Image (spheres, rainbow, N blue to C red):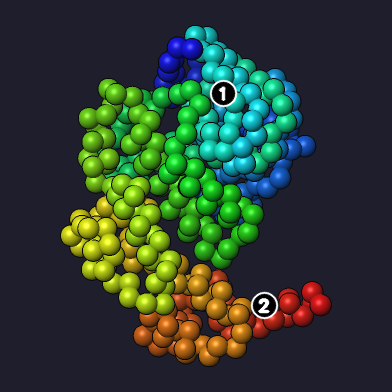
Amino acid sequence: MPDTYVNIGSPRQPRAPTDPLVTGSKKYGSAGLLLSSAGRGWTGLSAELRNHSKAVIAWRAPQSDVEICVDLIGNQSLVTRRAEGIEDRRVARRGTIWLSPAGWQEGSLEIAGDQAGILHIYLPLSRFTPSNLGTSIDEPGISALNYERAFEDPLLFEIAHAIASELQAQTSAGSLLVEALASSLAARLVQKHFSASSEQSFHRLARGGLDRRRLFRVLDYVEANLEGDLTIDRMASIACLSKYHFARAFRQAVGQSPHRYVSAKRLERAKALLTQGERPLVEIALALSFSCQANFTRAFRQVTGQTPSQFRHNVDLNHGNCH
């Protein structure tokens, strides 16, 4: 099978901009739709979790969004995409990814058997801007992001899994998390799936970000030490980088500063601690490195719209209603 590429860019027949989730419903129908990000206030990307039945449908993507489809389960079903000069055949397994160019509307998609747990991510081309990527990029550069045969990318799969988790169990900081994941997704696509002719333009981006091994080592350390030592110096030492280089590389890889990431994770941990008993609020605040209970309450209310006491009370009420 030939390695054939089609540039992302304007389609041959320009269309008016459309809501990617509306386009998804028209393309795939509503019967298999399990979960949708519609109405959740996400700004970085849109997403749907779907089951698919055996079918042949048009292969197209929204006008101004890249569509990334990810098999979260491993369906062992043959998927064939055809267009002029393209025949992409792949037996889907867990982690298989399909990329469709923005505006692409020429070809067919054949699903040979039922598929469960396919995540559809719609990433706006506006994510590929200098302010989002931390590097220079112009319109011709965006159009160099190429269609590829189905592929696998462990980091993209981890990002997709995090998006699916937020779809399945919405959190108070979900919009912030998705915004960061959208930046990471765009950066990864630029780093790994741009054409060779654009490689030099994005060398600084690829060089500046944390590699997957260091990134996950740091994220694992953060998760294990939310109630412990999480200074920028310590995190940088885990990544084996200088403090300055680490802060810049972490921001490029994750889409936010180490401080903002840790703050968001600590507030998520606070929610878990508030639901696990009557631990005093001041003790939770100090354990999560807030200087005092008042600062903890202020930060918690900014994210959730509730004070920690109100959150705990509402959780207790909900649990009581379930018995």
Going by the image, does 198 lie left or right of 297? left
Task: Tell which of 144 and 140 is nearer to you.
Answer: 144
Instruction: Give the CA separation, mark 2 to mark 1.
Output: 46 Å
Q: Secondary structure at mark 2?
A: helix
Q: Amino acid at mark 2?
A: Val
| Rendering coords of residue 164 (x, y %) | 58, 49
| Residue drawn at point x = 53 percent, y = 33 percent | 96
| Residue drawn at point x = 45 percent, y = 24 percent | 148
The crowd level at tag 1 (other Cα within 10 Å; few <14, some 14-19, many 20+) is: some
Going by the image, does 67 lie left or right of 7? right
| Rendering coords of residue 310 (x, y %) | 61, 82
| Rendering coords of residue 266 (x, y %) | 45, 72
Q: Tell me, yes or no, if residue 50 can be seen here.
A: yes
Task: Tell which of 226 and 45 is nearer to you.
Answer: 226
Q: Earlier in the sequence, mark 2 or mark 1?
A: 1
Q: Tell me, yes or no, if residue 126 can be seen here.
A: no
Q: Which residue is mark 1?
A: 90
| Residue drawn at point x = 48 percent, y = 12 percent | 1
- 134 versus 12 height, above or below: below
The crowd level at tag 2 (other Cα within 10 Å; few <14, some 14-19, many 20+) is: some
Q: Secondary structure at mark 1?
A: strand
The numbered dot on residue 315 is 2
- 15 versus 93 height, above or below: above
